[in-house]
Amino acid sequence: MNFELYKLQIIETVLVFAFLILVKFFARNSINRILGKFEFGVERKRISHKIVNLFITLFALIFLAGIWNIDRTQLMVFITSTLTLVGVGFIAQWSILSNVTSSLILFFNHPMKLGHEIQIMDKEYDIRGTVVDISFFFMYIKTADGDTITIPTSVVLSKTIKLNKSEHSINK
């Protein structure tokens, strides 16, 4: 392999990685500062970091594809095939898409935070406890007995929730 042939592409790749690290550093600080103003908990910050890092990494991969002259036609065929398979998977599993969407709505728009004591007001899901985590698919609630209960976020979003902001909240 001739180094001179790929010298410019290697230098550009190193610059993209350096820029990627720099942008991730500034994004992390910005996210912490912005979410700190709104008093979001550690879990919400962690999820926000993951989402922003995903987009930054995707942009870096697009730049690297351009630097290394990857054939656009073949790249587009690969991307559209992958997106089609993912789309078919989501259509086949509406519950997955529903849970992810519900998680985002709970994360950004619901007054409930990690550490809040809640009661899900439903005869099928008469659950009381402290919210310990909200993932893309489930909400985790710790009961007074010390048990951890997982509930799909789409179920949580569709039920009435009573918030009991306790003195023992994780995120005051």
Image (cartoon, rainbow, N blue to C red):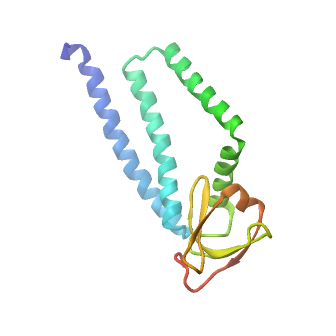
Tell me if 134 is positioned left or right of 63 in this view. Answer: right
Tell me if 85 is positioned left or right of 53 in this view. Answer: right
As displayed, is residue 82 above or below residue 157? above
Residue in view at x 35 percent, y 34 percent = 16
Nearer to me, 58 or 161? 161
Q: How far from the left and from the top, in percent, is residue 125?
A: 74, 67
Q: How far from the left and from the top, in percent, is residue 131?
A: 59, 70
Residue in view at x 23 percent, y 20 percent = 7
Q: Residue furthest right?
A: 123
- Where residue 85 sits, quadrant-wise, is top right
Tell me if 145 is positioned left or right of 152 in this view. Answer: left
Q: Residue furthest bottom?
A: 167
As displayed, is residue 117 above or below residue 37? below
Image quadrant in which the C terminus is located: bottom right
Q: How many marks?
A: 0
Image quadrant in which the N terminus is located: top left
Residue in view at x 68 percent, y 54 percent = 102
Nearer to me, 37 or 60? 60
Q: How far from the left and from the top, in percent, is residue 8?
A: 27, 21
Q: How far from the left and from the top, in percent, is residue 12?
A: 31, 27
- Where residue 119 sits, quadrant-wise, is bottom right
Nearer to me, 50 or 33? 50
Nearer to me, 112 or 96? 96
As displayed, is residue 73 above or below residue 171? above
Residue in view at x 40 percent, y 16 percent = 69
